[in-house]
Image (tube, helix red, strand yellow):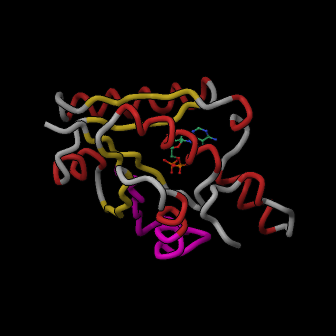
Amino acid sequence: MSRIAIFPGSFDPITKGHEDIVRRAIPLFDEIIVAIGVNSSKNYMYSLEQRLQWIKATFSDCKSVKVIQYEGLTIEACKKHQVKFILRGLRNSNDYEYEKSIAMMNQAMSKDIETIYLNTQPEYAAISSTIVRDIIKNQGNALPFLASGVRL
Ligand code: ADP
């Protein structure tokens, strides 16, 4: 059976931190699905189509990376795509505490799905989509923080 991981997030927009986590996970899994979670009550800065396109461009050189969108619970998307691993990136202890609670709830709902964490590299630890959006809104240069496929 092939090892498939899902990397869920908003990716509004995809950053160098996200890209690094996915690229470092490639040797660990047969396939990685970057999954844009769509929450109809949330306001995004970039459209779903734009975010999908940037993620596809970022990983166009990676045969084992796919991009999808999904609505609802991540574990339901896992079941639909035969995924047994949820991949997450950790920047600091706040990320860890937050991710731990979600992982425990997911485990309680679905015993056979494991959450796998990779620590960020120090140079990406301060990068968040929220701060990047702020830089863009204020006409700053966000390119050094954005994934390789993003074109503003
Ligand atoms: P969410 O909407 O779930 O917060 P994000 O798109 O912000 O989604 O992030 C998706 C995943 O990427 C999360 O596991 C998050 O911790 C991780 N992540 C975000 N930024 C970084 C970074 N700079 N380095 C490593 N991991 C990161």
- Residue 43 among those drawn in magenta: yes
**Where the N terminus falls, by quadrant?**
top left
The quadrant in which residue 25 appears is top left
In this view, the residue in front, 64 or 143, is 64
Q: Which of the four quarters of the rendered structure image does ligand 1 lie in?
A: top right
Residue 133 position (above or below residue 108): below
Name, please, the residue furthest toward the left.
Answer: 1
Residue 53 position (above or below residue 71): below
> Residue at the spot x=76%, y=60% of the render?
143
Residue 133 position (above or below residue 21): below
- Residue 112 among those drawn in magenta: no
Residue 30 in percent (x, y) is at 29, 40
The quadrant in which residue 110 appears is top left
Residue 100 in percent (x, y) is at 43, 26
Q: Is residue 59 left or right of residue 133?
A: left
Residue 152 in percent (x, y) is at 71, 73
Residue 98 in percent (x, y) is at 50, 32
